[in-house]
Image (spheres, rainbow, N blue to C red):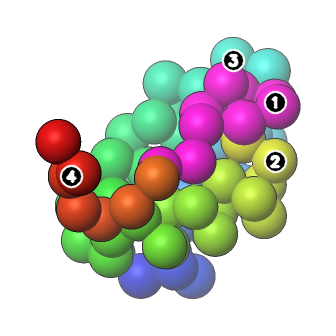
Amino acid sequence: MNLDNARKRIESAVTQYGQHAAPAIDLVMAEVRSDMGASAFNELVDEFDLELTYNIAPMESDHSTS
C-alpha cells in the first residue's frame, strides 16, 4: 500500500457509498496504519476530512506511551 493507492481507494469508496463509506474507508485506513504508520494515516484523515465526515479520528503516534 502507498499513499496514492490509498487515496484512490478512499475516493472510490466515497464515490460508491457516499455517506455510508466509513466501513470501506476503515479497511483502507487499517492497511495504511499497518503499512505506513501514524503519519500517513493522519495525513489521509486531514486530506479527506475523515474525522468530521466519517468519525475516523487521527492517531496520536506510532508508539504506545502506556
In the drawing, does residue 66 fall left or right of residue 14? left
Q: Decide which of tag 1 and tag 4 comes sooner along the chain.
A: 1
Distance, label 3 to label 2, CA atoms, is: 15 Å
Tell which tag, 2 or 4, sits nearer the viewer. 4
Q: Which quadrant would residue 13 be assigned to in this image?
A: top right
Secondary structure of the residue carrying tag 1 is helix
Q: In whole angstroms, how far apart are the C-alphas of marks 3 and 1?
A: 10 Å
Q: Is residue 54 magenta?
A: yes
Q: Which mark is residue 49?
A: 2
The residue at 70%/27% (across/down) is: 54
Q: Residues within 10 Å of mark 1 (few under 14, many from 20)?
A: few
Asked whether 66 or 62 is in front, the reply is 66
Identity, as a three-letter code, of the amino acid under mark 1: Thr
What whole-number distance in Å separates the C-alpha atoms at marks 1 and 2? 6 Å
Q: Which residues are magenta?
A: 51-59
Residue to which mark 1 is pinned:
53
The disc label shown at residue 15, or none: none
Say the numbered circle drawn on residue 64.
Answer: 4
**What is the quadrant of the C terminus in the image?**
top left
Badge 2 element:
loop
**Do the residues bearing badges 1 and 2 touch, measured as CB atoms within 8 Å?**
yes
Q: Earlier in the sequence, mark 3 or mark 1?
A: 3
Task: Pick whichever, 65 or 61, lies toward us.
Answer: 65
How far is mark 1 from mark 4, CA to CA?
Answer: 27 Å
Mark whose residue sits in front, 3 or 1: 1
